[in-house]
Amino acid sequence: MTEKAAPPPEGSLEALVELLTAELEKVRSEAQEIGLLVEQNRGEVEKLRQRQAAVSTRLKQIQPAFDTVPREDIRAAYETALDAQQRLFNTGGELERLQTKQEVLVRFGKTMQAVLDTLQLNKPEAVATSAAPKSFLVRLVEAQETERLRLSRLMHDGPAQVLANFILQVEIAGRLFEIDPAQAKSELVTLKGNAATSFQRIRDFIFDLRPMMLDDLGLAPTTRRYLDAMKEKSGQDLSFIFTGTEKRLPSHYEVILFRAIQQLVAVARDVCQASKVKTMLDLDENRVRIIVEHDGKVLDGKAMGEDDPYELRNLKERVEMLGGSFQYEGQEGLGTRAIIEAPILHD
């Protein structure tokens, strides 16, 4: 009877190779699954493009006969065109997100393979003393991928959506000028209002994406401005308390911590439906501490799990990359509290 081989010592070259090999298999498997979804979405996009082309043809047929075609038929045709464009836009956005994820996974797989090849060529004593924490590389890439998907989703739901609707409204108004100038004028008035709203939404998007204040003034003033703006727009009770000394932190600290505050406030407001959210920021010489409390619903058991839809697990990993800690506790009737603590490293 053959004895089962003992596992390689933790931190050894053999253990690192085994770990990377297993992770590489997971990455390749996920890339293959994403590839299948990409192909499915490509087919769906092609069908929607054909539908949009048919709808556009119908509109061209209606245009010369505006005087004879019933107004309801005209309205229905334009609503069908808008629906076709919206579906194509949404599905196209999903396809782009999947393609981005597939590209990242494929590129990461190639990088891992190159690392494996290099390790297997090196002598064991060259790396035996360098214990490899499980998955710093994996965690880093997952964090990058999460941010890519977040930005893709923001682009899709923000400026891209606004501009697509804006273009369609301009096209409708332009066609109405030829047959119903009064209605066209009314459409332009509506269009002007929508343009102002769209401009504000794009400004909000830019602020959410990367507030310039963060680079100019730092974490505390930017957080205060962000929460004041959210309170003004939503009417919700969002409060901010700062203690300690306002000072600048390393740029990557400020970005990660500001994103964490944004995420925690968004979860409290949109998911937990809190009526009151209180954010506290404390800065001292050697430590930063953030507390976000709210009176909303408690998140379900998926929070902080492997498939966390609220992305708190990813937030925790980003904070840990700063050498900090993240705690999230909630109890029905008593509220929820998230605590972030991180050391401030000095040069």
Image (cartoon, rainbow, N blue to C red):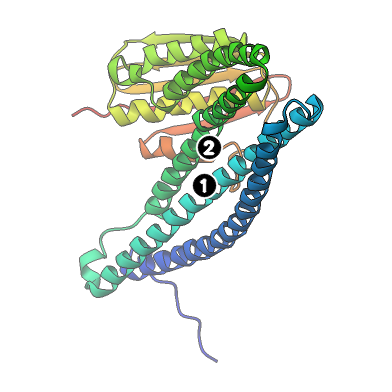
| Dot 2 and dot 1 residues touching (CB under 8 Å) | yes
Q: Is residue 288 left or right of residue 230?
A: left
Q: Is residue 67 left or right of residue 274?
A: right
> 291 and 159: which one is in front?
159
Q: Is residue 315 visible?
A: no
Residue displayed at 77% across by 32% down: 76
Identify the residue position indicated by label 2 in the image. 153
Report x, y in % for residue 230: 54, 14
Residue 97 got which mark? 1
Reply above or below: 12 against 316: below
Q: Amino acid at mark 2?
A: Arg
Residue type at the position of mark 1: Arg
Establish if 186 lies above or below 32.
Answer: above
The image quarter containing residue 161 is: top right
Mark 1: few, some, or many residues within 10 Å (few <14, many ≥20)? many
Looking at marks 2 and 1 on the same chain, the residue that comes earlier in the sequence is marked by 1
Residue found at the far bottom of this picture: 1
Q: Secondary structure at mark 1?
A: helix
Q: Nearer the viewer, residue 16 or 107?
A: 107
For the residue pair 268 and 32, the one nearer the viewer reads as 32
Res 180 → quadrant: top right
Residue at the (44%, 28%) spot, across then down: 259
Report the quarter where the C terminus lies: top left
- Residue at left 52%, top 13%? 196
Secondary structure under badge 2?
A: helix
